[in-house]
């Protein structure tokens, strides 16, 4: 990990989370970003700025620790974890252009990355969940709605959590 953690400012947070766990999660998130960049065809134009991604992780873990403390709980639901992470990605924008393109959709690379993370949480590979061909248009419309929200609305973790829950519920009652 090239980015360094300012331990003076975040010592207490690192103690609560565990520096090893923090670094492991950071590394995992950077790999996810690199996978997204590759799969989306951005290899030549976009890179993951690890310093900004580090800020995403610190903000995310700070929020999660505050939630745990406020609610006096030890664990936070997976949907909430992803919601806060996605919200910070949209706010901090860790994916940065190194070469600009003329394609309008490219302006919103971080919002696309956020949608990628959300959908991968909702539809994990190998879990037996899939989208049938007649439902592809519905999924495309849902993705467009997510992107609209991430682009033009205040990115609220509670609303993202509800979107994740709603999507998962829709997978259960499909029919």
Image (tube, rainbow, N blue to C red):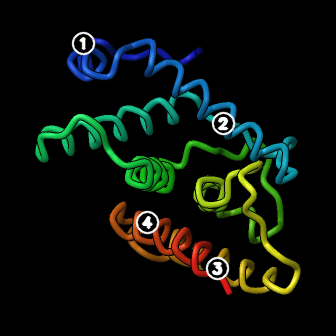
Residue 21, quarter of the rendered image: top left
Q: Name the residue under label 1.
A: 8
In contact (CB < 8 Å): disc 1 and disc 3: no
Separation of residues labelled 4 and 3 (CA atoms) = 13 Å
Write the residue at 59% across / 15% down. 1
Number of other residues with Cα within 10 Å of mark 4, as a class: few under 14, some 14 to 19, many 20 or more: many
Number of other residues with Cα within 10 Å of mark 1, as a class: few under 14, some 14 to 19, many 20 or more: few
Give whichever of 173, 140 is nearer the camera. Answer: 173
In contact (CB < 8 Å): disc 2 and disc 1: no
Separation of residues labelled 2 and 4 (CA atoms) = 23 Å
Separation of residues labelled 4 and 1 (CA atoms) = 32 Å
| SS at circle 1 | helix
Residue 142 circle label: 3
Q: Name the residue under label 2.
A: 48
Q: In this view, does 76 lie to the left or right of 101?
A: left
Q: In this view, does 17 lie to the left or right of 74?
A: right
Residue 131 circle label: none
First of labels 4, 3 by sequence position: 3
Spot occupied by residue 154 in the image (x, y as percentages of width and height): 38, 70
| SS at circle 3 | helix
Residue 160 circle label: 4
First of labels 4, 1 by sequence position: 1
First of labels 2, 1 by sequence position: 1
């Amino acid at each position: 990990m090239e980015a360094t953690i300012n331990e003076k400012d975040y010592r207490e947070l690192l103690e609560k989370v565990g520096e090893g766990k923090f670094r492991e999660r950071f590394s995992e998130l950077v790999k996810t970003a690199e996978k997204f960049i590759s799969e989306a065809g951005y290899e030549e134009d976009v890179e993951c700025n690890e310093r900004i991604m580090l800020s995403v992780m610190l903000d995310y873990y700070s929020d999660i620790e505050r939630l745990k403390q406020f609610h006096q709980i030890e664990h936070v639901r997976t949907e909430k974890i992803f919601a806060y992470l996605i919200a910070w990605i949209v706010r901090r924008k860790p994916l940065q252009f190194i070469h600009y393109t003329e394609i309008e959709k490219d302006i919103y690379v971080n919002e696309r990355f956020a949608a990628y993370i959300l959908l991968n949480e909702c539809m994990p590979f190998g879990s037996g969940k899939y989208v049938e061909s007649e439902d592809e248009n519905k999924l495309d419309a849902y993705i467009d709605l997510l992107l609209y929200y991430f682009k033009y609305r205040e990115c609220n973790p509670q609303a993202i959590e509800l979107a994740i829950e709603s999507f998962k519920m829709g997978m259960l009652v499909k029919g």
